[in-house]
Amino acid sequence: MIVSVDDIRAAARRIAGTIEPTPTVLSASLSAAAGVPVHLKLESRQTTGSFKLRGASNAILQLSDAEKQRGVVGASTGNHGRALAYAAQREGVRAVICMSRLVPANKVAEIERLGGDIRIVGNSQDDAQQEVGRLVAEQGLVMLPPFDHPHIVAGQGALGVEIMQAVPDAAIVLVPVSGGGLAAGIAAAIKAINPATRVIGISMARGAAMKASLDAGGPVFVEELPTLADSLGGGIGLDNRLTFAMCRDLLDDVILLSETEIADGIRHLYRHEREVVEGAGAVGVAALLAGKVLSAGPVVALVSGRNIDMDLHRRIVSGERTEFETMDGVA
Ligand SMILES: *Cc1c(COP(=O)(O)O)cnc(C)c1O
């Protein structure tokens, strides 16, 4: 494995001073529904509102002085950019964040507030990534991608260590999957600590690039579509070096969800757990509510982020059927 549990433990020690240790709580409502203890790892409470600060901090803290001088650049669906801007500002490093027009305005505004240098280009993560390549070539910026980088994967993996400390007898851990940096890091940690624990990835059905790539046996292009789980949008990179192989070798399964199921997850987390969570962060809970996860032992659902547009959130929790749910079943 290119990222080992030792790399992950080293990352956990390195970032300990820059991130919040987040709580793991037992969910009464989901435990009753599932018939086994269901725990929520509330990484939505992390500084910057998502787990992405773990990987970004781990990468920024390993830059040389010369690299810090040059500055960093990364493509993002919003949360990586926000984490990168935060971690870079803390170290006095310039951060350029390239995003597509699909990134919600609330996420762009937060990155601006953190001093990030914003470039909005095209309609997909692939378009944003092209701009990153141009800036690396023209300005010598250091590329820190959102998932396919050993320091990013190791930083996210620290969550796997925390989850196994909190629930050592977990039978299943549910992890949202987009580019797979989060799932790869968490699975590498968990399989090293307790190989019997199953790690299951969850994505939205609309544009699940990792699932399509795993089915095809290698990275494939998947069209990016609007989804409530906007943080899970984008491809895995046709030149993927790290996360495809790790997800292929370490994940036990990948489950896909409709927009209606994701909305149910957001609504349940608000009404029953009093948690504001974005679509990508709600997919584990949504999979449980949809009856798509059957377990004979304790389950941990990783709640990965909370950065949802609050007007959209209000509409979902008040029971309105949004434009996303009406796209279910439509090509
Ligand atoms: C980025 C992100 C994910 C997916 O992480 P990957 O490493 O790209 O698979 C899940 N949830 C949230 C909230 C995110 O921001």
Image (cartoon, rainbow, N blue to C red):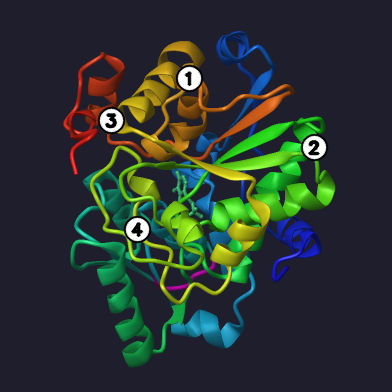
Residue at mark 1: 289
Instruction: Identify which residue is drawn at 80% across, 37% down.
Output: 165
The alpha-carbon separation of the residues under discs 4 and 3 comes to 23 Å
- Write down the residue under mark 2: 165
Earlier-in-chain disc, 3 versus 2: 2
Label 2 packing within 10 angstroms: few (<14), some (14-19), many (20+) = few
269 w.r.t. 143: above or below: above
Q: Nearer the viewer, residue 192 or 208?
A: 208
- Give the Cα separation between the discs numbered 4 and 2: 32 Å
Q: Quadrant of residue 298?
A: top right
Q: Secondary structure at mark 3?
A: helix
Residue at image mark 4: 234
Q: If the image is split into quadrants, where does the C terminus sit?
A: top left
The quadrant the N terminus occupies is bottom right
C-alpha span from label 4 to label 1: 25 Å
Name the residue beneath numbered marker 3.
310
Residue shown at 80% from the left, 40% from the top: 196
Dot 3 or dot 1, earlier in sequence:
1
Task: Write down the quadrant of residue 242 in the picture.
Answer: bottom right
Q: Position of residue 74 (x, y in %)?
A: 40, 69
- Type of the residue with mark 3: Met
Q: Mark 4 or mark 2, which is nearer to you?
A: 4
Residue 202 appears in the rendering: yes
Quick check: is the Cβ at mark 4 less than 8 Å away from ligand 1? yes
Magenta stretch, main secondary structure class: loop
